[in-house]
Image (spheres, rainbow, N blue to C red):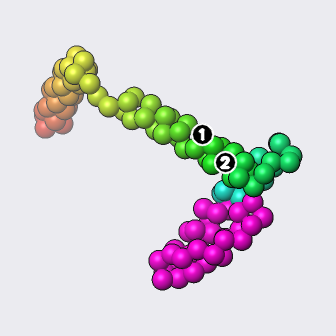
């Protein structure tokens, strides 16, 4: 087990983690630290607990927005059962393209 020192809201925390995870934890701590700094700047005089609470709420809000955006993108990408007319149109176009290819190949043979 490794140990690392994290600084969040100007406080040092000694944390144990798996070997090799120190840099990842430091990165996560910096994200929390950034949000804590925003909370302290926007509302001076917050207690340490309330600063961390607001930092957690800011991060949770960002995460929720990303999840909502991702779900919306996935819903737009999914094909539903109403796409049968599109499938039929594509198949008809593919058939026409194949016929055109055959005609062009026949003309090339006769030339």
- Crowding around mark 1 (Cα neighbors within 10 Å: few <14, some 14 to 19, many 20+) is few
- Residue 40 falls left or right of residue 100: right
The outermost residue toward the right is 44
Membership of 45 in magenta stretch: no
Q: How far is disc 1 from disc 2 in space, using C-alphas? A: 12 Å
Depth check: give the residue in front, 47 or 76: 47
Residue carrying label 1: 61
Which labelled disc corresponds to residue 28?
A: none
Depth check: give the residue in front, 60 or 67: 60
Q: Which residues are magenta?
A: 1-30
Q: Determine the residue positioned at 74% across, 67% down.
A: 11
Q: Is residue 98 visible?
A: yes
Q: Determine the residue positioned at 55% across, 44% down.
A: 63
- Residue 72 in the image: state x and y as whole percent: 44, 31
Depth check: give the residue in front, 88 or 25: 25
- Residue 34 in the image: state x and y as whole percent: 73, 55
Label 1 SS: helix
Q: Determine the residue positioned at 75% across, 55% down.
A: 48
Depth check: give the residue in front, 80 or 55: 55
Residue carrying label 2: 53
- Residue 37 in the image: state x and y as whole percent: 78, 53
Which of the marked residues, 1 or 2, is nearer the chain's N terminus? Answer: 2
């Amino acid at each position: 087990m490794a140990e690392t020192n994290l600084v969040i809201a100007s406080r040092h925390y000694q944390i144990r983690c798996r070997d090799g995870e120190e840099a990842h934890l430091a990165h996560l701590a910096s994200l929390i630290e950034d949000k804590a700094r925003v909370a302290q700047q926007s509302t001076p005089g917050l207690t340490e607990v309330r600063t961390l609470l607001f930092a957690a709420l800011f991060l949770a809000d960002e995460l929720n927005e990303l999840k909502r955006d991702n779900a919306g993108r996935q819903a737009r990408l999914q094909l539903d059962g109403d796409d049968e007319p599109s499938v039929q149109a594509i198949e008809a176009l593919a058939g026409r393209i194949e016929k055109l290819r055959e005609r062009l190949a026949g003309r090339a043979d006769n030339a």
